[in-house]
Amino acid sequence: MHNYFALHKPFGYLSQFKNNKKRKKPLLQELHNFPEGTMAVGRLDAKSEGLLLLTTDGKWSNLVRSAQYEKEYWVEVDGKPNSTSLNNLRNGLPISEFLTKDCIAESISSPNLPYIESVKVRGDQHGPTSWLKIILREGKFRQVRKMTAAIGHPTLRLIRVRIGSVHLAPLKAGQCSKIMASAIDQELNFAM
């Protein structure tokens, strides 16, 4: 029988269970005692935080990573992108070796939610920042960061808040909850 989890990955953690490199970053196994064979469904880099799904079911992992499911990110960026920049995000951008697919990209107000820590990423002397909501159906290596850099507004903070219909709320940083495999297709209530 397979296991399925939703985890609020904190900033600074690697989305893996073993570190074959000499980097001294904390791993997921330091957050909870996950069953043998648990793997991350997709990744969030060490500087990103938010929803990370975990499972022992490889087929489910492949399905969730597919274009069938939306991945929603809240992104704090340097400066304030104008409508042309947002349209460029929406309509696909050449980044690295590929062209991104159409996506949803819009400005949002600064998130003020109890389950997301309030973090000031830099001092006011460095200029304004703003928040974007970006919803993708793909997920290439560091894609959101590359997209915002391509429009001249580098990412300062990145939080994944939703995969399919699984939401980050109300999990706080480091908290984990068991979910059912079908949770990706329906609204669910976390049992804390």
Image (cartoon, grey):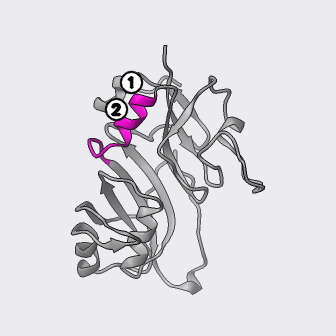
Query: Few, some or many C-alpha atoms within 10 Å of disc 1 (few <14, some 14-19, many ≥20)?
Result: some
Residue position for label 1: 181
Q: 46 or 177, which lies in front?
A: 46
Residue 137 place in picture, x, y as percent = 29, 51
Q: Amino acid at mark 1?
A: Ala
Q: 184 or 115, which lies in front?
A: 184
Q: 103 or 172, which lies in front?
A: 103
Q: Amino acid at mark 2?
A: Ile
Relative to 25, residue 77 above or below? below
Residue 125 place in picture, x, y as percent = 58, 86
Element under disc 1? helix
Residue 82 place in picture, x, y as percent = 29, 81
How many marks overall?
2
Q: Are marks 1 and 2 in contact (CB under 8 Å)?
A: yes
Q: Is residue 192 magenta?
A: no
Query: Few, some or many C-alpha atoms within 10 Å of disc 2 (few <14, some 14-19, many ≥20)?
Result: some
Q: Residue at x 77, y 54 (%)?
A: 24
Element under disc 2? helix
Q: Is residue 19 left or right of residue 190?
A: right
Start-end of magenta stretch = 58-70
Residue position for label 2: 184
Give the Cα distance between marks 1 and 2. Answer: 7 Å
Name the main secondary structure of what is drawn in magenta.
helix
Q: Is residue 26 left or right of residue 159?
A: right
Q: Is residue 68 magenta?
A: yes
Which numbered circle lies on residue 86? none
Relative to 185, residue 44 above or below? below
Residue 124 place in picture, x, y as percent = 56, 81
Q: Residue at x 45, y 27 (%)?
A: 190
Q: Residue at x 75, y 57 (%)?
A: 23
Residue 16 falls in which quadrant of the image? top right
Q: Residue at x 26, y 41 (%)?
A: 68
